Amino acid sequence: MFEPRSFFALIDFVHGDLFKDADHVWDGLRNLKAYMDREKGEPLAHPLLSDGIPLAEPLVLYEGEIYSGRGCRIEYDNVTRGGLKIVRDGELLPGASLIMAGATILGSRIQIGRGVLIESGAWVREPAFIGDHSEVRQGAYMRGYCLVGKRCVIGHTTEVKHSIFLNDAKAGHFAYIGDSILGNDVNLGAGTKLANLRFLPGEVQIKSSGGLVGTGLKKFGAILGDRVQTGCNSVTSPGTLVSPESFLMPNATAPSGYHGPRTVIR
């Protein structure tokens, strides 16, 4: 019931090793720090990048190189559908990514895939992995240990820390995602909050029909299975597991514990 395969299809997720040999789906969170520290990759470095200082001009990332975006022609079409187009000196740069002027980058352990857009006003702190054709919108706050798959959205004034987005997961507006996992095609309504810390100190335990199950985690938000949707201003309590195809209705609070497939939480 708590195995990763009960919540996610991992066949197209490039970081599926996070869940290798996992007995429980939350083991992905337990493995996240070590996994990202191990997968360092090439550091994100350029003379215009200074820790904690907003970019003075845009940067284009293309085929392992970083260029100033000044003078480039840019089409800001639907990013998650591959619509970002960057033309430099009359040449289209297929799969190029863009960090807009005014974005702030803190640290160099940041991996950016193809066709990614990071908008002005976004704050990205290392380590962060951002997959192909994903979008980090104005005012987004990535606080470290954020692993984002393909075609994802981290939206305006959305805060993410120590969390995993599988492919096509979207948190478009005013959300908080702490110590959580969003499955494939999850969509968070505006104002969704995934609370990750109990009022009373101690390990977050999962309520199930068989009793309480320990997680070994003091901070643990929610795990939302594939194609889960949440309504506007909804909240999940620490240690909430929502199975695939379920709905959390607007203004509702999901109690901690396990919720089965196709559940409607009101």
Image: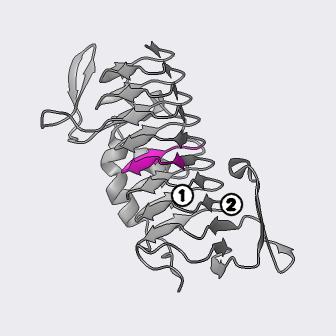
Q: Quadrant for residue 145, please give it.
A: bottom left
Q: Amino acid at mark 1?
A: Ile
Q: Quadrant for residue 73, please give it.
A: bottom right
Residue 165 colored magenta? Answer: yes
Question: What colouring method underlies this structural image?
Answer: one colour
Marks 2 and 1 sit apart, C-alpha to C-alpha, by: 10 Å
Position of 18 compared to 119: left or right? left
Q: Residue at x 51, y 75 (%)?
A: 44
Q: Is residue 141 above or below residue 225?
A: below
Q: Is residue 186 visible?
A: yes
How far from the left and from the top, in percent, is residue 242? 42, 25
Crowd tier of the residue under label 2, counting other residues whose Cα lies within 10 Å: few below 14, some 14–19, many 20 or above? many
Residue situated furthest left in the rendering: 201
In the image shown, does 93 or 64 lie closer to the viewer?
A: 93
In the image shown, does 17 or 140 lie closer to the viewer?
A: 140
Residue situated furthest right in the rendering: 90
How far from the left and from the top, in percent, is residue 262? 51, 16
Position of 265 compared to 111: left or right? left
How far from the left and from the top, in percent, is residue 98? 65, 67
Q: Amino acid at mark 2?
A: Gly
Name the residue that disc number 1 marks: 130
How far from the left and from the top, in percent, is residue 265? 43, 15
Q: Residue at x 50, y 79 (%)?
A: 49
Q: Is residue 24 above or below residue 120?
A: above
Residue 66 colored magenta? Answer: no
Name the residue that disc number 2 marks: 115
Chief secondary structure of the magenta portion:
strand
**Chain part drawn in magenta:** 155-167
Q: Is residue 209 above or below residue 163?
A: above
